[in-house]
Image (tube, coloured by chain):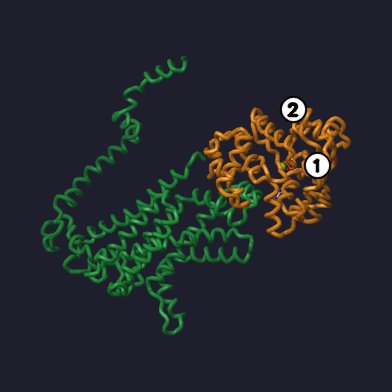
Chain colours: A orange, B green
Amino acid sequence: MNNELQKNGDDRSPGEPIVEITAMHKWFGDFHVLRDINLTVHKGERIIICGPSGSGKSTLIRCINRLEEHQKGRIIVDGIELTNDLKNIGKIREEVGMVFQHFNLFPHLSILENLTLGPVCVRKVPKAEAEETAMYYLEKVHIAEQALKYPGQLSGGQQQRVAIARSLCMRPKVMLFDEPTSALDPEMIKEVLDVMIDLAQEGMTMIVVSHEMGFAKSAAHRVLFMDEGEIVEENIPVEFFENPQHERTKLFLSQILHME
Amino acid sequence: MVDSSQSIQAEQLKPPITRIGVIGWLRANLFNSVFNSFLTIVTLYFLWKIVPAFVRWAFIDSSWNTTGAACRAAGGACWSIVAKNFRFIIFGFFPYESQWRPLVAMILLFILLLLSSNRRFWRKWLGYAWLIGLFAMGLLLKGGLFGLSSVDSTKWSGLPLTLLLSVFGLTAAYPLGVALALGRQSRMPAIKSLCVVYIETIRGVPLISLLFMSSVMFPLFLPEGITINNILRAQVAIILFTAAYIAEVVRGGLQAIGRGQYEAAESMGLNYSQKMRLIILPQALKIVIPPTVGILISAFKDTSLVVIIGLYDLLKTTQSTLSDPRWMGFSIEAYIFIALIYFAGCFSMSSYSRRLERELYRGN
Ligand SMILES: Nc1ncnc2c1ncn2[C@@H]1O[C@H](COP(=O)(O)OP(=O)(O)OP(=O)(O)O)[C@@H](O)[C@H]1O
Ligand SMILES: [Mg+2]
């Protein structure tokens, strides 16, 4: 699909680790959602997480910015360990952007205000500068002309692109995506994926929960397969899709291939 | 080209004449079924019976500026009771020669309210204007400085008292109610249960008993020699009471905001107060504008309950006019007059809330 990018990906020099998860467990009440997760993500790396519904993919990436709390093991992001310390949580959230399945734009603020809110309130960037940055990123996601509209006036694909731009305005070191295209109509999926591929080309560190094989093949360094709260298999995209090792992976891949 | 010819055609196609205009409207709204036609005719009959008689009483046979005796002779409405007792009804026991002071204070208050109703003026200077305005109003009522004679607060009565109790009651109750609603959602059990107990207790007690408690029981607990102004106590009771109701309405609004909004705000790194102030509350409070205004309106009317602890608000000054033998029996006219004043207050609140909702609508 995008050969140049693929090549870039393959001869990556392993940057320093930016997210390190070791022996991490999480329970919802009695329910053991995440079991012994070990995952290191390096700077500039792009990881795709896939797996059946309910396998804990969302929960895993939500642990990385503490939208969910883990109960055992360690999570270190950008050198800071996630504990109950609110200061550290705040610092980590500044560096980790997140894009949600349902966009979660702030409906009472204009697009521009959505984008400047974080930089102005959290990073204490002057308003004029924040607006300039916002326009830069809106340009990048190809909707600068919508800056003064409100989220309710935009299509799903446009809203998701705004959501990506909103995260980028914080100049994060890592971007988390939780099924960014699964709430979109087919014709809007491409416009969002294109933006994500651009982002990948610029070397952004990305952890993406997605079943988009095309995106995985063209932009990812590694694909992780999760099932029942465990990371079952992990491989480079080509190998992962062509030559899955585990039975559960094979079954899952046959199911998503069947759907397409 | 195709487009323009189509639009011309569309323009030429007018709706059938029976569907528009007066006849169309009548047919569509008043006579669109047998039952509705029947209701329309019955209503018209009652209007025909009532309206002319009312007009005759209120305008044709009425007296406007006469003595009570002359009113009785005329037979119609006696608006003279309002005209002749106007200053007592409005200002009550405030010293007669100083009544310009509460008048100026009220005018100041109206100007400030009017300015504040325009969201474009929500700037720093408006805050200072309110500070200066409040000081000026307090000075005008209380006196004792700059050569103004001192007026004891027991003399404050009539409309200024009603406005004092309601404007400050409502503006203080609103933020308190919001704080209580947030407290009730708190993860900290102590804060949460405190708020729940407060809200449920207050809502389980009628305002009258709160007023009684604040004016009769509360002083018993104060040490010898210390007294707290009666008006202040009533004011506090009204604030505490209204806040509990506002808290529950606001809580409903908070529950209507999806988890995604909280998560988006948190994942950006906003702290609790930023998240609430910038993201959650603006949306939640907007949703609950209609029920909130309902509460504010009923609280405004409920301020008249302070009569039972001996404060002379607008309602009480009117009632004491009515107990004057010269004016006995004209209660309908007097009550219509204060009803109009209350209506003006309530109606401006509800129309302001509708305007605010429209302004905040913005495409979502
Ligand atoms: N707040 C919660 N409380 C209790 N259980 C939860 C909670 N959130 C998720 N779960 C459960 O944890 C499991 C994993 O959920 P998660 O959302 O991580 O799955 P997922 O892999 O993202 O699935 P999907 O592809 O459907 O999004 C599911 O069984 C879910 O029911
Ligand atoms: Mg999920």
Q: Which residue shows up at 17% across the image and 58% down it?
A: B78
Q: Name the subunit of mark 1.
A: A
Instruction: Measuring from the top left, give residue B258's x and y in whole percent.
Output: 60, 47
- Reply above or below: A204 against B180: above
Instruction: Measuring from the top left, give residue B128's x and y in whole percent.
Output: 41, 60
Q: Is residue B165 visible?
A: no
| Tag 2 residue | A260
| Tag 1 residue | A226
Disc 1, ligand 1: is the CB inside 8 Å? Answer: yes
Determine the residue located farthest toward the right in the rendered image.
A245
Left or right: A228 as drawn, with respect to B62: right
Left or right: A152 as drawn, with respect to B300: right
Q: Label 1 crowding class (10 Å Cα cut-off): few <14, some 14-19, many 20+? A: many
Residue B216, disc:
none
Disc 2, ligand 1: is the CB inside 8 Å? Answer: no
Regarding ligand 2, which quadrant of the image does it lie in?
Answer: top right
Left or right: B16 as drawn, with respect to B254: left
Q: Is residue B10 visible?
A: yes
Instruction: Measuring from the top left, give residue B199's x and y in whole percent.
Output: 52, 63
Q: Which residue shows up at 36% across the image and 23% down it?
A: B15
- Nearest the eye: A250 or B51: A250
- Nearest the eye: A176 or B299: A176
- Nearest the eye: A8 or B298: A8
Q: Label 2 crowding class (10 Å Cα cut-off): few <14, some 14-19, many 20+? A: few
Left or right: B299 as drawn, with respect to A191: left
Q: Which residue shows up at 43% across the image and 85% down it?
A: B224
Residue type beneath disc 1: Met
N-terminal of the pair, mark 2 or mark 1, is 1
Residue type beneath disc 2: Glu
Find numbered disc 2 in the image and state the secondary structure of the residue it sits on.
Answer: loop
